[in-house]
Image (tube, helix red, strand yellow):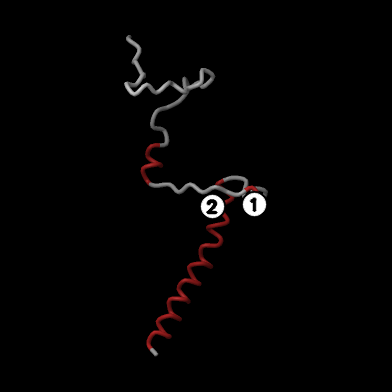
Amino acid sequence: MKKANHSTDSGERDTMRPEYDFSGAARGRTAARYAEGTNVVVVMRDVLDVFPDGIAVNEALRALAPVIRRRRKMRGRASRVTSRD
């Protein structure tokens, strides 16, 4: 089998380090999840002790979401009442 030539005409050099090993990788493993849509958020260092991973962040957001939704609903009602006057 002939090895594919990955060089480009634009003169870009290969930046893949020799110590990178993708021999156990599976192509497209996360493609379906990526296609569904994903938001990436950077957690600041000062809160890493509280939110060490994505699971902790999602748990906190799920707990907070109902409060935010109620407040939005209440604000929507308040603006409709004041706009009628």
Image quarter hosting the C terminus: bottom left
Which residue sits furthest bottom?
85
Q: Amino acid at mark 2?
A: Asn
Residue 59 found in image quarter: bottom right
Q: Residue at x 34, y 24 (%)?
A: 10
- Residue 30 place in picture, x, y as percent: 42, 36
Residue carrying label 2: 58
Which residue sits furthest top?
1
Callout 1–callout 2 Cβ contact below 8 Å: no
Q: Amino acid at mark 1?
A: Val
Which badge, 1 or 2, comes first in the chain's sequence?
A: 1
Q: Residue at x 40, y 82 (%)?
A: 80
Q: In front: mark 1 or mark 2?
A: 1
* Left-right relation of 14 to 53: left
Image quarter hosting the N terminus: top left
Q: Residues within 10 Å of mark 2 (few under 14, many from 20)?
A: few
Pick whichever, 14 or 80, lies toward us: 14
Pick whichever, 59 or 71, lies toward us: 71
How many dots with numbers?
2
Q: Residues within 10 Å of mark 1 (few under 14, many from 20)?
A: few
Pick whichever, 11 or 16, lies toward us: 11
Q: CA distance from mark 1 to mark 2?
A: 14 Å
Is residue 10 positioned above or below 70 on the image? above
Tell me the element at label 2: helix
Q: Residue at x 58, y 56 (%)?
A: 60
* Left-right relation of 19 to 32: right
Residue carrying label 1: 47
Tell me the element at label 1: helix
- Residue 12 place in picture, x, y as percent: 39, 23
Pick whichever, 5 or 8, lies toward us: 8
- Residue 37 place in picture, x, y as percent: 39, 47
Picture disc at residue 77: none
